[in-house]
Image (cartoon, rainbow, N blue to C red):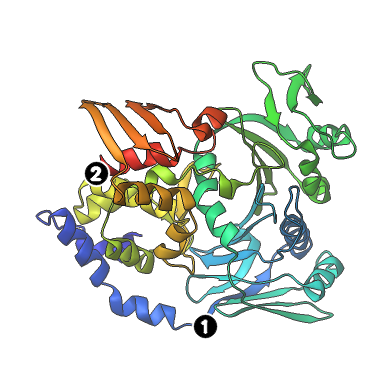
Amino acid sequence: MNDLLYSYQNVSTLNKTKGINNLVMAHQTEIEEINNIPCFFWGSLTDPYLTAKCWTTIAKVVRSSFGPIPPSLRDPIITAGAKIMRFEGFSSCNGVYVRLDMKPEAIDGEFIASGTTNVDFNEPMLNALNAIQKNEKVTLAVGQHDVHVITSKTKVAEKKVTLPPRWIKGLTSVQLYLTDMDKKFELNKIQAIQLFQSLPKGNIKGEFYITKRAGKFMFSTLETPDSVRIGGIHRLRLLEGILPLVNKIYIHESSDKETCAFVCEFGKMQLLMAFSPDAYRGFSGEGKALENMTENLPIEWVYGLNSLLKSNESFDPTMLAIENDIDFGTIENLTASLSSMGLLGYDIEERSHFYRRLPFKTERILSLNPRLKNAKKLIDNEDIQIITKRHNYIEANVKGTGVTHKVIINGDNQHCTCDWFTTYQGKRGICKHILGVKMIH
């Protein structure tokens, strides 16, 4: 980011609005030139067999479903930039998120520009991937409108398709889960294979936990203080195809012990697979991003940063604020907004955000979130009555259907008498009543 922002490093008198506007306008010509480049990357894979196995695993995820929604999606998101290639996607039920981070050592070629595309992995592509052998030369070309994979036997091209709405919603919340995770276990190859050999057969219901006893990892139906919960344990079979190739597996868990993620380390690349709390729950329905979408920031700022920042580059809000003399409160709200629209991903091992440029507008993500839409409707209809308001405390009545709900916000604690809050206790995001009260204050 430093090369893009260099011209503003010595500016110290700009106010926060002028700082952002100048930051965006300074590189408008450069942005337009980059957006007109049809090819993002052209080069070869340094480990084609491993890469093909990882791509096949991603294809397996996006073709699967573990809930009521039948398998219907086949299209990973591909992002090129900052000398890194990222492939990511969701299962059709949106309960499994997968991302492959290909480090500079995994690819030998030229990054002509940074950008993102979204293509299908159809049968010809899967057949080509399954046929790739070790030490075979494989060429990859990623462009704005298509992706090409060229092997010694065949050449396959996949065209850009529309990004599924459920994936957009999933991207707005999954990184919020990842940022809340801590590393719990580290498994070497032998430990990982032994663990998966004990994986229960069939679609087992109920909660399982990964625990460690006498240096060996195992699955158990009993929770212990240091165990990791796995909801929908049969979903772990998605990882079986790459187990013989891993160097290590890191297991992360969220602070509420609801969600977990497995990071498969291969050296040149890293594959992350995150699992929602249960097989019937998708990341897109969790509503975790709602609280970050209540700030009414000028949409031009978000558009401008989206045009300015490069795909895959590390996103450091503190440096962005310092180098451009932008108010820290403003940059914090901007960061929350970018996160809420899926424009920030999270590297769980590096513990840092990266920028993800996506082909959709803010209005689209807002329209996909019914709770946000309904909260705004409560405000427009003047259905929210503030009863008490003092420092870090708000009490309000919110009109419902034939009933009035009481909302209490006391610092970080919030409560509502509606059925949604009673059922989920905030575990699937805040209800529309709490959201509405927070939006007007």
Which mark is on residue 38? Answer: 1
In this view of the protein, can residue 189 be seen by the observer? yes
Quadrant including the C terminus: top left
Amino acid type of disc 1? Answer: Pro
Task: Look at the picture and state if 145 lies above or below 370.
Answer: below
Residue at mark 2: 329
Residue drawn at point x = 52 percent, y = 35 percent: 420
Amino acid type of disc 2? Answer: Gly
236 relative to 439 in the view: left or right: right
316 relative to 426 in the view: left or right: left
Task: Look at the picture and state if 112 lies above or below 195.
Answer: below
In x, y percent, where is residue 388? 23, 26
Residue drawn at point x = 15 percent, y = 61 percent: 18
Q: Do the residues labelled 2 and 1 touch (CB within 8 Å)?
A: no
Inter-mark Cα distance, 2 to 1: 37 Å
In x, y percent, where is residue 315? 40, 53
Q: How crowded is mark 2: few (under 14 residues within 10 Å), some or many (20 or more)?
A: few
Q: Residue furthest front?
A: 402
In x, y percent, where is residue 346? 50, 48
In x, y percent, where is residue 96? 67, 48
Q: Nearer the viewer, residue 158 or 401?
A: 401
